[in-house]
Image (spheres, helix red, strand yellow):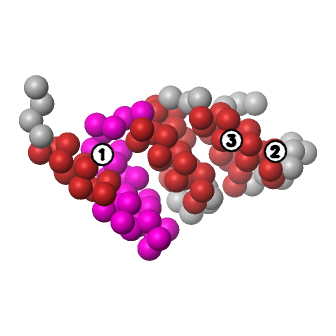
Amino acid sequence: MGGLLDLARLLVAPTAEGRGASEGELQSEFVEELTFSSADEIVGMLRTMLEEDWMALPPWARNLAFRLACLQRPGDAELLRVAAADLRAFGPDWNDIAEELLREAERIELTPEG
């Protein structure tokens, strides 16, 4: 398999590549690849997928990807803001979490380093 981005694209259009894997198998492959991907790989995949079609990637996959990236980069205020905006786009169920992410991003930006 070609990596996280390829699996994400297959989630969007599983029959386009003619892989023959069931939807459940494809989802399992994506989750496994995502679980062991670096924050850079995850953020790159998200950026590409959102640029190609911001609504194509299933919300569960987006939420999991953003969550794992944020856990790997807890001090990245920009990533927290992007994750919050994404959650709001698919809310209102996640608006409280989005607000928490925004507060944390603001706290990070206001806290002097040192």
Whichever of labels 1 and 3 marks the residue nearer the N terminus, that label is 3
Residue 78, labelled with which disc? 1
- How busy is the neighbourhood of tag 2: few (under 14 within 10 Å), some, or many (20 plus)? few
Which residue occupies 44% across, 65% down?
A: 94
Magenta residue span: 72-99
Residue occupied by mark 2: 25
Quadrant where the image shows the C terminus: top left
Q: Amino acid at mark 3?
A: Phe
Residue occupied by mark 3: 30
Q: Position of residue 34 (x, y in %)?
A: 60, 37
Q: Are marks 1 and 2 in contact (CB under 8 Å)?
A: no
Whichever of labels 1 and 2 marks the residue nearer the N terminus, that label is 2
Whichever of labels 3 and 2 marks the residue nearer the N terminus, that label is 2
- How busy is the neighbourhood of tag 1: few (under 14 within 10 Å), some, or many (20 plus)? some
Q: Position of residue 103 (x, y in %)?
A: 23, 55
Q: Amino acid at mark 1?
A: Glu
In the visual, does 107 lie left or right of 47? left
Q: Are marks 3 and 2 in contact (CB under 8 Å)?
A: no
In the visual, does 60 lie left or right of 107? right
Q: Is most of the magenta stretch helix, strand or loop? A: helix
In the visual, does 56 lie left or right of 18? left
- How busy is the neighbourhood of tag 3: few (under 14 within 10 Å), some, or many (20 plus)? many
**Secondary structure of the residue carrying numbered label 2:** helix
Image: 23 above or below 77? below
Q: 23 or 114: nearer the eye?
A: 114
In the rendered structure, does residue 84 fall within the stretch colored magenta? yes
Question: For residue 92, which quarter of the picture?
Answer: bottom left
Image: 69 above or below 88? above
